[in-house]
Image (cartoon, rainbow, N blue to C red):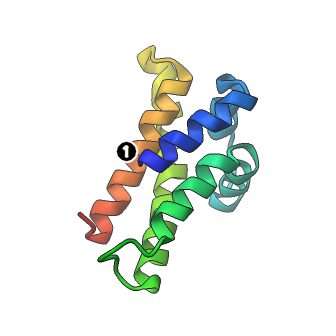
């Protein structure tokens, strides 16, 4: 999650946060959302994948890390959608809803995968 946060900070240096948030709220399939995320937020995408796939000391096998990265990516994308859907009715800033949703989605994916 720290890698996602650092990458997201880098991504917002070049693109307005409102643009990123609005694209996360746009409709589409999971593949459409994943493509938009990778295109608009390359630093957060690359940072998260690098952190998930790196062979850290004591890390599980590559297949397990890859499955974790896929589930975290899906959780992050779907969480951003949910965060955006809840942000406006709750009076929360759209970007904050997106970030909170991304973090919650990643955490849920990690818990579901049985990671600590």
Query: In x, y percent, where is residue 9?
Result: 58, 34
Left or right position of 16 against 112: right
Query: In x, y percent, where is residue 51?
Result: 48, 61
Residue found 49% across the figure and 51% down from its top: 76
Left or right position of 4 against 23: left
Above or below for 115 versus 2: below
Q: Nearer the viewer, residue 13 or 71?
A: 13
Q: Secondary structure at mark 1?
A: helix
Residue 21 image-quadrant placement:
top right
Does residue 85 appear in this view?
Answer: no
Residue found 46% across the figure and 55% down from its top: 75
Residue 113 image-quadrant placement:
bottom left
Query: In x, y percent, where is residue 43?
Result: 65, 48
Q: Nearer the viewer, residue 90 or 8?
A: 8
Left or right position of 113 against 87: left
Q: Residue furthest front?
A: 57
Above or below for 49 versus 21: below
For label 1, the residue is 104
Q: Nearer the viewer, residue 116 or 82?
A: 116
Query: In x, y percent, where is residue 6?
Result: 52, 41
Q: Answer few, some or many: residues within 10 Å of disc 1's Cα (few below 14, many 20 plus, some between 14 and 19).
A: many
């Amino acid at each position: 999650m720290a890698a996602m946060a650092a990458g997201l900070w880098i991504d917002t240096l070049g693109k307005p946060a409102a643009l990123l948030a609005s694209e996360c709220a746009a409709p589409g399939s999971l593949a459409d959302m994943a493509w938009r995320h990778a295109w608009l937020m390359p630093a957060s995408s690359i940072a998260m994948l690098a952190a998930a796939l790196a062979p850290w000391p004591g890390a599980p096998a590559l297949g397990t890390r890859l499955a974790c990265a896929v589930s975290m990516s899906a959780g992050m994308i779907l969480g951003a959608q949910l965060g955006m859907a809840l942000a406006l009715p709750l009076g929360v800033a759209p970007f904050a809803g997106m970030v909170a949703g991304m973090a919650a989605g990643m955490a849920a994916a990690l818990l579901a995968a049985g990671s600590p």
